[in-house]
Image (tube, grey):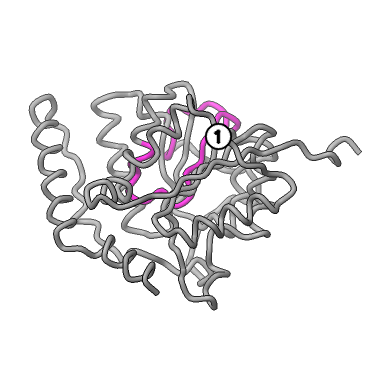
Amino acid sequence: YNEYKSYLRMIMTPATESRDTTDESRDTMERSRVSHVKHPKKRNYRQRAHSNPLSDHVFEYPVCPETMDWSDILPALKSPDQIKFCDVGCGYGGLLVTLSPMFPDVHMIGFEIRVKVSDYVNDRFKALRKENPVYNNAGVIRTNAMKYLPNFFKKGQLEKMFILYPDPHFKKSKHKWRIVSEGLLAEYAYVLKTGGLVYTVTVVKEVHDWMVDHFQNFPLFERHHDPEDKVEQVLIGSTEEGKKVLRNKGESWTAVFRRISDPYDNV
């Protein structure tokens, strides 16, 4: 219960909202000095913080990865096989904006279930691309990763997946809504190549323990840590939720897991 109250304070603190607005205003002023491109403002895309992933949302999704048309989402993509990073529940796209110039030769996609939030990220990348074409390698699609992940990616296609600040779903009756479960780990293992990594971050210790326990008890994942991993170094500071935590002097728990080989692949 105390973790639930702390979580609510973090995402609903009025002071944090004002800081968000101030930061956004500063960013807008800085960009205006070098560009006349109009960037979207988050206040015009407000939506509830969470969404029921098991409800019957209306989504368009491909029957299989080969039938997916990525042209409107990733303009520079020549082959769907080039998509190597996936941010599950990408929120306002902060991580993708950070990783895009860090990996200019890698295509990456964010999955977001909320309509207005995915609209914001899409408009954000459209504006960024007008300033710098490097952002052509990143985009967002509104979909439900809990249901349709294998419809978008082939077996062993992805190199990295990100599950950052997921909805904690505190009530025991809603644990089935959590983005980490035994069934979903099987799908993550399917789309990740051997040696691929899953990065997780949360502000709720119980959710961190839940994710660590599930990953470590799944036969195709093992805990991984590389002190020189430049991606792990930017996880917290690049996302909007992470910036809130840093400003409020809160604590985040990070864990990385590596996809190991399946002994039955060659059977």
Is residue 18 toward the left or the right of residue 128 in the image? Answer: left
Q: Residue at x 28, y 41 (%)?
A: 124
Q: Would you say residue 235 sits in the magenta stretch?
A: no
Does 253 appear above or below 82?
below
The image quadrant of residue 160 is top right
Is residue 22 toward the left or the right of residue 174 in the image? Answer: left
Instruction: Provide residue 203's location: percent of width, then percent of height.
Output: 39, 55
**Mark 1 Cα shell of 10 Å, populated few (<14), some (14-19), many (≥20):** few
Is residue 208 toward the left or the right of residue 15 in the image? Answer: right
Amino acid on which disc 1 is placed:
His
Instruction: Provide residue 242's location: percent of width, then percent of height.
Output: 32, 47
Instruction: Provide residue 246's location: percent of width, then percent of height.
Output: 27, 46
Q: Would you say residue 75 sits in the magenta stretch?
A: yes
Q: Residue at x 63, y 56 (%)?
A: 214
Does 214 appear above or below 108?
below
Query: What residue sits right under mark 1 in the picture?
Result: 225
Q: Quadrant of the N terminus?
A: bottom left
* Depth check, front residue: 247 or 263: 247
The image quadrant of residue 156 is top right
Q: How many numbered marks does the figure carry?
A: 1
Q: Residue at x 43, y 39 (%)?
A: 73
Q: Quadrant of the C terminus?
A: top right
* Depth check, front residue: 75 or 10: 10
* Depth check, front residue: 8 or 109: 8
Instruction: Provide residue 255's location: percent of width, then percent of height.
Output: 52, 44
Q: Residue furthest top?
A: 105
Q: Residue furthest right?
A: 267
At mark 1, the secondary structure is loop
> What is the magenta range?
72-96
Q: Residue furthest bottom?
A: 173
